[in-house]
Image: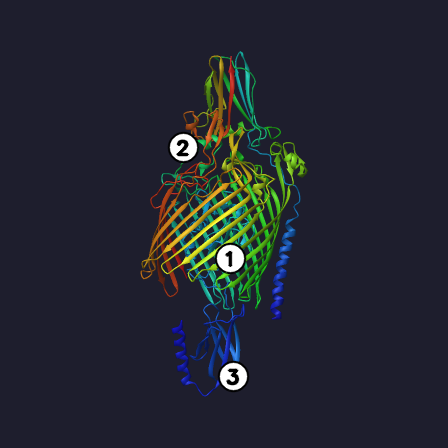
Amino acid sequence: MRKKNIFNSTILSTTFLIVFTSLTSCSDDDENPEVVNEEEIITTMNVTLSASGVPTITLQSQDLDGDGPNDPVVEVSGNLTASTVYSGSIELLNETETPAEDITEEVAEEADEHQFIFVTSGSVASTAYNDEDADGNPIGIAFTLTTGEAGTGTLQITLRHEPKKPNDGTLADAGGETDVVQTFTVTVE
Amino acid sequence: MRTYAIALFAIIAACNINAQDCNSILLGEIIDFHDNTPLHNATVLLTGTTKSVVTGLNGKFRIENLCDGYIELEVYHEECKTKLITVLIDGDTYQEISLEHHLEELEEVKIVGSSIQNKTNSALEQTLKLETIEQYSSQSIGDALKEINGVSSLNTGANIVKPSIHGLNGSRVLVLNDGVRMQDMEWGEEHAPNIDINGSGSIAVIKGAAALQYGGDAIGGVIVIEQPKFKEQDTLFGKTVINGVTNGRGGNISSELTKVFENGFFIKGQGSLKRLGDREAPNYILSNTSSQEKAGKINFGKLLFNWGFNVKYSYFESDLAILRASHIGNVDDLIQSINSQEPAIIESFTYDIESPRQEVAHHIGSLNFYKRFQGLGKLNVQYDFQKNRRFEYDIRVGDDANKASIDLDLTTHTFSSDFKWDSEYKYKLHTGVMGRYQDNFANPDTGVRRLIPDYKKYDVGLFLIGEYRFSDNLTVDGGLRYDYNRIDAKKFYRTSRWEERGYDEQFQDIVIDDLGTQLLTNPIFDYHNLSGTLGMEYQVDNSSTLRFNYALGQRAPNPSELFSDGLHHSAARIELGDLRIKSETSHKFSVSKEADYDLWAYSFEPYVNFLSDFILLEPTGVEFTLRGAFPVWSYRQTTARIVGFDASIYSNFWKNWSTSHKFSLVKGKDLDFDKALINIPAANFRNKVSFNRPKWSDFEISLESNYVFRQNEFPEDIIVFSPEQQQDVLLQINTTPPAYHLLSAYSKMQFPIGQKNQLQVSLTVNNLLNTAYRDYLNRQRYFADDLGRNFIVQFNFKY
């Protein structure tokens, strides 16, 4: 009987010892955790529209807090000129990093998995693709924009990831997921 | 029984004629070791002879005409371990013999599982038997639990099934896996319990917080998973279950082997493997829904009646693909998915597991020791260790394509001890203490801001429960529990979020570092929770029982409710916790009336649960980012009421035929805002008819109908601005899918193989009519239909 009790208390004290050592050994990491700066986040889209003989116009949408509560800030540098064919280019940046990371390069590298889709209205008459991926399908980093008569219009730019390629240039047909979407309201004069 | 006794007496009388001229008498008394009560109907055999007697109601027996000297007796009682005892006869002799009654730890594996003890006295409680568990061998524990009336599930597709009891899930449902409280990040809606259903012997569900010994925060309920029990005798046994599944074109295999030695020592091993490819809805393939699971368990110990120990280690690993079409970009994609009736991406069948996916591994190690004190009770001491490692992979581009977006490592140590005074017939007392330390590490290498921060958590719990038997038909029970929880987190907030939430006014003192756009904070919160229960069980007559129970439960907020902040990519939603959230309290009243007659049985269990500071997560609006607009889901607290009932009828009016009917209804209301609560399961009605003929190799066939009503009560949909459409649109995020009706069939036969082995073959067909349906509590209902027809063939070999 006595022997059994000794055995039992051995088990008990071993258990306590294991608990104690495991508890103490785990509480030594009192350092502060490492901050995470999101790498893939796109904070900024810059669109440059240029044509000979007219001022170059830039459109910008910037959301520095990413999925934070602040809305993107949209800026249009000036008015477009009527009945003009602009040559356009898109730049995507991650400005949470210094220096800012150019995401456009990643899109270009995986061009077959990406496409910008343009939707126009009002005085923005049309857009056309000016680049293509390895399969000969459009990407949209470079494009042309044709303005119509004076008035207001909108240009909506959407970057789709893994769209159906080729597609008919509409969002519905392209499918995939949206990486960036912004609608710019512009004045054509 | 009486005839048996008479027959035995006749044998004794016959023996007496042959007896020699020895005249000593042995007067004996057989008592229960455990509470010193007399054991009636025990058989005492004089070894080497055919002389045997049976004890009477007072536990006494008498053997006459014995010669002086040593004799050996074999004492047998159907609920006890057989005992051999040597007695010295010296004239008329008196001998007391104690038998080990109440074989809690040593109960024999009974296929029917009828020996399962209740965990509570007065609460609503139901147990799944081994037979049912085996039927669900190729599915998950959440699927099997839906057999229990009042239990539903919150699904993310078919792979992630989270049990929900009386409308409550997640941290409100405590899962006790073989004595260890699971710490597997149960807070997430897309986190399923990390348990392999194979290898469990019984699964009990206590609907409510009445089982205080396990925790006071089980406002939804407790799921108690236990190992099959076995007798302390020299045996070697095991089983192998193999399932072939058509929907998913795969299957699983599970095998276990147990060796028990005469001295009580045992060793047991179990392992399972499961592999399924893409699942199918009636009209299309659910692309990227394959899964893979591995599980293993080893345990050894010594389980004697008066003391024992048990050392266990178990491992569970799952790699689950998540429906490709459910990974969406923004609110416009969600609008498009809800409006289109088909998933956006349908590819051909594959076994590949691509992103989005989850990879989870869970380890449990435990040491348990118990000792029983004669005439007093039982002491139990346990230490357990758990490690949960979770990776979630989203669809990412470039260098990050194969990098996890969520990488969490949760380690938990728990020490607990309890003592149960169960030697008195009139009353029983159970008291215990628990200490727990938990550490969560969120790996920053993901390159994605942490959804759940690094934290340390400390829990201490104390409980006392008692049970008093007023008479043979009235038992009253009650208990109290106190829990202390401390959470000490290190969390980064975006400065803009910190200010938008108003934390800069209330919590500025917890900021420990300012990194410009982000703040590092150190929230330390303490919670003191009190829980209690009071109930009674009244045996109305031989066939019916009435129970009443009141349970007070209190639960501290979990890390997700406190700290969530940011875009949950896989769900395409911004989830916002709140540091101001305090403990929630539940007052649940339940009544149950059960009756079991020869030809039929019924149960009726109404309940009402009043919840104050009830924590819920619901869509509250949208936030705009460059990626578009995202629905915001925020946690808030409210006063709520959940009311409902579970009813069931079982009948057996004709030989070989039986029917069962179950109906379950829950209604949830947010009393502060006078609106419906989110995610309350729809009413459902299950009817089953079975034909059973044991003569034909245990043949059984059954047909079951499951009608799920439409949930008519749900919170209003929200209006969001669609950047794509440049206007406000109604986002039908809360609208519930229509009612549906599913038929399923099951048939089995059992064949003996050799002397001891058995083979059971069964066929299950789920969704027999290949009905296309969507369930309100499936988070993928926006994107795709639920599973189509599925045939499961099972071979269950017992040896």
Give the quadrant of the N terminus of chain B: bottom left
Of A110 and B699, which appears nearest the observer?
Answer: B699
Judged from this view, the residue extending furthest toward the top is A53
Q: Chain of mark 1?
A: B
The residue singled out by tag 2 in the image is B340
Q: Chain of mark 3?
A: B
Sequence-first tag of 1 and 2: 2
* Label pair 3/2, CB-CB below 8 angstroms: no
The residue singled out by tag 3 in the image is B92
Residue B45, image x, y percentages: 45, 77
Q: Is residue B1 above or below residue B216?
A: below
Distance in Å between CA atoms under marks 1 and 2: 53 Å
Of A97 and A188, which appears nearest the observer?
Answer: A188
The residue singled out by tag 1 in the image is B536
Q: Amino acid at mark 3?
A: Asp
- Callout 1 and callout 2 share a chain: yes
* Label pair 1/2, CB-CB below 8 angstroms: no
Distance in Å between CA atoms under marks 3 and 2: 91 Å
Q: Chain of mark 2?
A: B
Label 2 crowd (10 A; few <14 / some 14-19 / many >=20): few
